[in-house]
Image: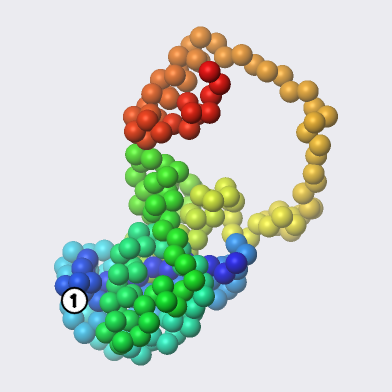
Amino acid sequence: MRQVFLDTETTGLSAEQGDRIIEIGCIEMVNRRLSGRTLHRYVNPGRASHPDALKVHGLTDEFLADKPSFGQIADEVAEFIAGAELVIHNAEFDIGFLDAEFDRLKRPRTLDVAGAVTDSLLLARELFPGKGNSLDALCKRLEVDNSAREYHGALLDAGLLAEVYLRMTRGQKTLVIDGAGDAAGGAALVQVDLSTYALPVIEPTPEEEAAHAALLCELDKDSKGKTVYRVLAPA
């Protein structure tokens, strides 16, 4: 399975009103392991960034003046994402900008090139209903180090998203762990037959039951009555 974690920075918030991509970052993962392939390009948008956008990405018009246009990197972008599952945080935003750039060049749109798109923001909202699910919030919740993120940067954010995505979908603690051994190359995992163990059942105290009921009420409130535990609990 080939996935590409993708992020863009833009001159503003509206592709429909002519805002443009100024940076794109892509990181490739194959079978849930980083391949080492990345694509990172700065882009001259041919227009100034909105002041609010500049505060977010810090890429000045002077810095971007000698960078290639999107048309000059379009082949690279299309080749890198071809056939891959794109994983994007708030995918509608980035896909909208990519499609606008491809439309200007009369090229096939993003989903005509890539295999599929997964929106990690929607996934996060399903996992953490009622909580903050920005990339920064997810990094904090899932203990992903984002201390280098002074400004938003496309390649940096794509890398953080890859870490966040793996932790949301498997609970993996690092990108270098696989089933053959630990992160330091230690011994392989040993399978244990748990049926040989008699596990004690510890009954909750009345105080613990009350605290659990209160927690379920909070979850019901946050998820608008969709608490799975209540649905699955025996009558």
Residue 22 vs residue 210, the one in the foreground: 210
Q: Is residue 49 left or right of residue 214?
A: left
Q: Which residue is mark 1?
A: 18
Residue 138 visible in the shown view: no
Residue 190 visible in the shown view: yes
Which quarter of the figure has residue 70? Answer: bottom left
Q: Is residue 223 left or right of residue 100?
A: right
Please name the amino acid that badge 1 sits on: Gly
For the point 57% across and 14% down, the residue is: 204
Classify mark 1: residues with Cα within 10 Å, few (<14), some (14-19) or many (20+): some
Q: Secondary structure at mark 1?
A: loop
Instruction: Report how many numbered discs are placed on residues in the image.
Output: 1
Residue 22 vs residue 121, the one in the foreground: 121
Q: Is residue 22 above or below residue 212?
A: below
Quadrant of the drawing holding the N terminus: bottom right
Q: Is residue 124 above or below residue 44?
A: above
